[in-house]
Amino acid sequence: METSAFVKWVAKYLPGVTIRIIKTLNDTSNPLPYLFKTLLKPQFSVDGKWEALIQENVLVSADYVAMDSSAPLKKRDSMGKASGEIPKMAMELWLNEKQLTDLDSLIAQNGSDAQIVAELFKDTKKTLGGAYELNEATFLEALSTGQAIVSDADNVGTGIRMDYGYLSENKFGVAKLLTDSTYKYWDDVQKIVDKATLDGNAIQVAYTDGPTINLIAALDQTKQLYAFGQNFVGNNIPAPDIDQLNAFTKKRYGFVFAPVNRSIRKEKNGKRQTKKPWKAGSIVYTSAGQVGSLVYAKLAEQNHPVAGVTYELVDGYILISKYRKNEPAVSEYTKMQARVVPVISNVDEIYLQDTTTIQA
């Protein structure tokens, strides 16, 4: 590795460019907002491991006791632990000889710094975005299933499997499929809400995919309950839209639906494909707020930087590096590395319903 051929601009603009890119990625008005940024808090791991405690966390009543008597001893909730090594993510992009020549021409023609920076740092935006995309894909799969499984078929490198220990008693199916308009979905919802109440939890948000929300809205029971709440009389009851549905569910059950409609593009061996990481038909009922942590560790290269390479640490865990190689031909590289993984730890507050599985 050698120093970037454009080190003057890299040294001057890389810190500011990464800040602007991250601001754009984190912008709440972003057409593709990142749920992991909202529902996970960053957490540094000294030993490079992630860990999630699995605890019943059930509230029991205290007892009235006589004066000067001892306090009654209660049994402690059962506790388990899910843990593992924090995996490493990485990607790199490069400017080939033709692109470098074009950039040289732009500089020779006295192009503005803004024009030069726009061309030189295109790959920086893509690699930072790539880290966010992988975090989001892993988190959405994990939240909708309780597991994150990345197979070798979808990944260049090592496949991973993480199980966050969703409680079996907090997993539910359905009496009928949502495609059956006669299914009384809200009867099953009441059971889930009642279970959460017994556990001392208040369901405030139900995360699920858009098609599932549409099927729920089209059910006969949904339309009848919504019409009753609106004092509507008639036979041709329309299906409520998402705003109407949320107004109804908030008033009657205390929660709202949060649509998760996200696609992630993956690339392997030069071929790209689009996947939806959220498991279709899964509904995750939980309280508002964060559900876990984005656990990260320090990279080896942070402690052992390579001479000639320009580095920038972003978000505390994403290491961007820019450098030059001359094999097989001169090229300018942008590389992203991170050791980070989403960890869902509030499993005692999560109630998972699989609407594709009929349960007696």
Image (tube, rainbow, N blue to C red):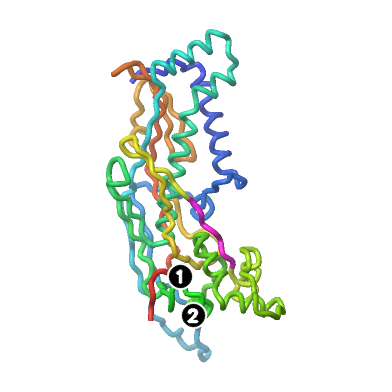
Q: Is residue 165 above or below residue 301?
A: below
Any part of residue 104 in sight: yes
Mark-to-mark CA distance, 1 and 2: 11 Å
**Does residue 197 appear in the picture of this structure?**
no
Residue 221 picture location, percent across and down? 56, 78
Picture coordinates of residue 222, whole percent (x, y): 58, 75
Q: Which residue is mark 1?
A: 351
Which element is circle 1 on?
strand
The single residue placed furthest to the top in the displayed view is 108
Which residue is at a point 42% across and 43% down the rendered structure image? 265
Is 251 in front, or is 98? 98
Quarter occupied by the C terminus: bottom left
Q: Determine the image quadrant of residue 337.
A: top left
Residue at the spot 39% in from the left edge and 16% down from the top edge: 97
What residue is disc 2 on? 191
Helix, strand or loop under label 2: helix
